[in-house]
Amino acid sequence: MKNNQKGFTYPLTLCLLVLFLLFFSMHIERLQSKRMMAHETAAILQQEYYFLSSVKKIEVIFQAGGSIPSKGTITYINGTMDYQAETPSGYVQKVNFTLRTKAGDAIFCRGFFDTRTKKLIKWVELK
């Protein structure tokens, strides 16, 4: 009986250690992916907030002044929004928006404004 148990403790300990490391690495990987997803979600939500705020500011300028300035810049804490308005064609005026974040990303969008109601009627994200 003694001969059969010789060397049994080391392989058992090694197997338990490998199982522990396997589960530990799976949990670490899941934690890292959640953190990365949370960071990306926060960045996307901030970009959407900057676009929404810019559109609202342009609408206020459009309603107060009667026209959209041909070029302009709106500065935010973590980026700047540049916009460029094209000449109106019919009842629609196109405005190109460019968001440059401090992280170095540049996002391009286009807004279509109705010159009669002076409101945004269509929004397109460009790639």
Image (cartoon, grey):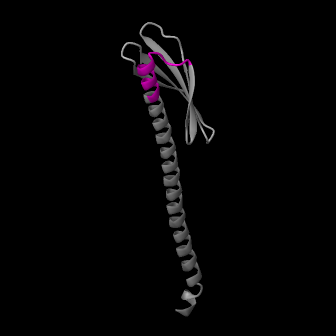
**Location of residue 87 in the rendering, given as x and y in whole percent from the top left corner:** 52, 11
Q: Is residue 37 above or below residue 25?
A: above
**Location of residue 111 in the rendering, given as x and y in whole percent from the top left corner:** 47, 22
Report the number of discs.
Answer: 0
Question: Residue 99 is drawn in which quadrant?
Answer: top right
Which residue reaches farthest right?
104
| Span shown in magenta | 57-70
**Location of residue 108 in the rendering, given as x and y in whole percent from the top left corner:** 55, 27
Identify the residue at horizontal 53%, vertical 58% (top origin): 29
Q: Nearer the viewer, residue 13 or 4?
A: 13
Which residue reaches farthest bottom?
2
* The C terminus sits in image quarter: top right
Q: Nearer the viewer, residue 45 or 24?
A: 45
Q: Main secondary structure of the magenta part?
A: helix
Identify the residue at horizontal 47%, vertical 8% (top origin): 89
Q: Nearer the viewer, residue 87 or 15?
A: 87
Q: Is residue 112 left or right of residue 73?
A: left
Q: Is residue 127 above or below residue 88?
A: below
**Location of residue 27 in the rendering, given as x and y in whole percent from the top left corner:** 50, 62
Which residue reaches farthest left?
117
Which residue reaches farthest top?
90
Q: Is residue 8 visible?
A: no
Give yes or no for residue 68 being in the magenta stretch.
Answer: yes
Identify the residue at horizontal 53%, vertical 50% (top origin): 36
Give yes or no for residue 79 being in the magenta stretch.
Answer: no
Q: Is residue 12 visible?
A: yes
Identify the residue at horizontal 44%, vertical 12% (top origin): 92
